[in-house]
Image (cartoon, helix red, strand yellow):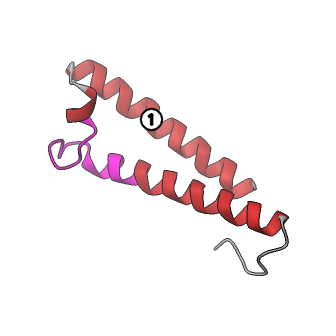
Amino acid sequence: MKRYFETKAEVGALKAQLEAARRAAGAEIATFYDPRSNLEHADVIVRQEQLKRDMLRLMDWAEAWGRGETSGSAG
C-alpha cells in the first residue's frame, strides 16, 4: 500500500501542476488534457494517466491479496 500512496501523491502533484498551467492558459479542460492537441504538456498528461492506471492495478492487486486470490508481487 505504501507504493499506492506514493503514486497517489505523485498524481496529485501532477494534477496541481497541470491545472495551474491550464488556468494560466485559459484552456478548456477537454482540449488541455488531450495530449494530441497539447504537445507542450503531453508528457505530463500521459505520465499522470499511466500513474492512475498503476493505482488501479495496485488497488486490484491489494484487494485480490486480501481475499487470498494472489501470491505474486505488485510489481
Give percent across and percent down for residue 33. Answer: 28, 38
Q: Nearer the viewer, residue 75 or 56?
A: 56
10 horizontally vs 4: left or right: left
Q: Residue under circle 1?
A: 15
51 horizontally vs 46: left or right: right
Q: Hey, what amino acid is under mark 1?
A: Lys
65 horizontally vs 22: left or right: right
Q: Is residue 31 above or below residue 34?
A: above
- Residue range highlighted in magenta: 32-47
Secondary structure at numbered mark 1: helix
Is 33 magenta? The answer is yes
Mark 1 Cα-neighbour bin, 10 Å: few <14, some 14–19, many ≥20 = some
Which quadrant is the N terminus positioned in?
A: bottom right
- Quadrant of residue 65 within the rendered picture: bottom right
Residue found at x 37% / y 27%? 19
Give percent across and percent down for residue 35. Answer: 23, 48
- Quadrant of residue 32 within the rendered picture: top left
Residue found at x 60% / y 45%? 8
Q: Nearer the viewer, residue 39 or 67?
A: 67
